[in-house]
Amino acid sequence: MSALPSSLLLVGAGKMGTAMLDGWLALGLDPKHITCIDPGLTDEPREALAAKGVNLVASPADLTPPPVLVLAIKPQMLDSAAQSLASVAGPATLLISILAGKTIADLRARFPSAGAVVRAMPNTPAAVGRGVTAAVCGPKVSERQRATADALLGAVGRLEWLDDESLIDAVTAVSGSGPAYVFHLVEALAAAGAAAGLPSPLAMRLARATVEGAGELLYRSPQDAATLRQNVTSPAGTTAAALDVLMDETRGLPPLMREAVAAAKRRAVELSG
């Protein structure tokens, strides 16, 4: 609790910003000490935020620099947001950004008065408290500020600290984009089930429940993924026959996944440039 800031400014209340907000409230951060700015909100999400008890403001004009400013806007909005927010990030402010592709150097250039910067990459399971976030500290982050960032970012799931900012692009390709790969696995498994003769709605229910259950087993079990896979696989059985296809090093899942992650990483590098 002591690592939580006395006040916090959240810029952007989309899905990820709201997921983080819910995590902070669950930690015990007083909603009266949280201010939110998001002029693009429609009535329904605005009313939902108001119901949580946070302070909603239209602009930062009358705000004093907070101990923590969290940027949860779309990356393409950074320049316009920085024009109005730069003065709100003071020398004692910790700026936490979850903007994909925007480096610590990008953030420092737009918020030159900010005391410290942490760059983070969360993923969408944060909405159910099961996200994973990778983060890296800028050069002026104090131990207390890192502890604050640790508490805030860890409120929505697992947190991994990086020593090298260049790893963020690979993180984006693996865990940032990774949930979409899993969702597509469900789609592909359901389509394969339908091709094998199952009614499509049943195939989708089976595929979805299988991935949900396997994920929960992986979460709860102390065993690694390889061991769990082996536990399902009987020699010369049905699973082994399928894995002969999936684990083929020339046309199976390993080379396909390497290609997919490499493509995502290349795109992340392009966006950061």
Image (cartoon, rainbow, N blue to C red):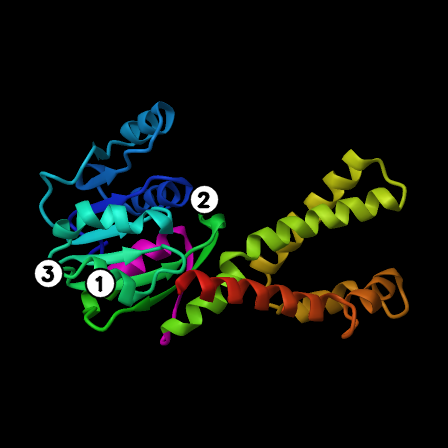
The quarter holding residue 93 reads bottom left
Q: Is residue 98 above or below residue 237?
A: above
Q: Amino acid at mark 2?
A: Ala
Q: Is residue 118 above or below residue 195?
A: below
Say which quadrant the N terminus sits in: bottom left
Tell me: 267 left or right of 95. right
Q: Residue visible at 86% across and 45% down?
A: 195
Q: Amino acid at mark 1?
A: Ala
First in sequence, mark 3 or 2: give its number.
3
Q: Is residue 238 magenta?
A: no
Mark number, residue 65: none
Residue 159 visible in the snapshot: no
- Determine the secondary structure under disc 1: helix
Q: Amino acid at mark 3?
A: Pro
On the image, numbered disc 3 is attached to which residue? Answer: 91
How far apart marks 3 and 2 lie (CA) works out to: 31 Å
Mark number, residue 127: 2
Percent coordinates x, y for residue 13 in the rendering: 33, 39
Q: Which portion, as a residue range, is magenta?
A: 147-164
217 or 193: nearer the viewer:
193
First in sequence, mark 1 or 3: give its number.
3
Say which quadrant the C terminus sits in: bottom left
Q: Residue visible at 19% across and 71% down?
A: 140
Q: Is residue 152 magenta?
A: yes
Mark number, residue 109: 1
Q: Residue visible at 71% across and 46% down?
A: 187
